[in-house]
Amino acid sequence: MVEREFIFLKPNTIRRGLTGEVISRLERRGIKIIALKMIQFTREQAEKLYEEHKDKPFYNELIDFVLSGPSVVMVVEGPRVIEMVRHIIGATDPLKASPGSIRGEFGMSVTKNIVHASDSPEKAEREMKIFFSEEEILNYRLDVQGDL
């Protein structure tokens, strides 16, 4: 079954010049990008994305951080893509993330951990709607074998 996943590269990813590195790691695993754009989050988008953390002590720091610079938001697609992306990016805490994972290599703290990815199909659907209209999500054939 093909799933969709929402991912965003946090402002420190852009500031550190790691955007291409993160995207290429996803693409090399055969993950299909079906929507992609660089944006500056609005406060409303940030608060909606992180509404489940509203009562947690790190909430305001997290909101301020995602508003601190541009981010790249994307929707990806593939079989078991949520599980695959979670494996590629690693645990939320960079100190607990597997060596070789994106967060394990580049994350600096739980808040500044390079990348956000949805952890369920329901969250992915909710989160992608904050940033993308259905018209912005493309349908095309990805040929990972090179047969064009």
Image (cartoon, rainbow, N blue to C red):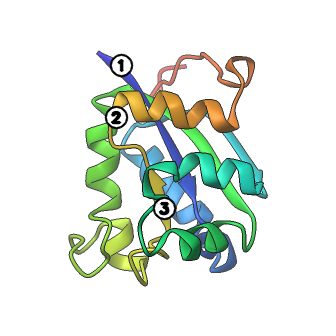
Ranked by sequence position, the earlier of labels 2 and 1 is 1
Q: In this view of the protein, can residue 145 be seen by the observer?
A: no
Helix, strand or loop status at disc 2: helix
Residue 2: assigned label: 1
The residue shown at (41%, 82%) is: 109
The residue shown at (43%, 75%) is: 57
Residue tagged by mark 3?
A: 115
**Residue 9 position in % (x across, y down):** 57, 59
Q: Amino acid at mark 3?
A: Val
The alpha-carbon separation of the residues under discs 3 and 1 comes to: 22 Å
**Residue 94 position in % (x across, y down):** 32, 77
Residue tagged by mark 2?
A: 81
Q: Amino acid at mark 1?
A: Val
Q: Nearer the viewer, mark 2 or mark 3?
A: 3
Q: In this view of the protein, can residue 94 be seen by the observer?
A: yes
**Residue 114 position in % (x across, y down):** 49, 69
Q: Nearer the viewer, mark 3 or mark 1?
A: 3
33 to the left or right of 111: right
Quadrant of the frame with the C terminus: top right
The residue shown at (42%, 35%) is: 123
**In this view, 11 is above or below 120:** below
Residue 136: assigned label: none
Ranked by sequence position, the earlier of labels 3 and 1 is 1
Helix, strand or loop status at disc 3: strand
Helix, strand or loop status at disc 1: strand
Label 3 Cα neighbours within 10 Å, binned few <14 / some 14-19 / many ≥20 = many
Ranked by sequence position, the earlier of labels 2 and 3 is 2
Quadrant of the frame with the N terminus: top left
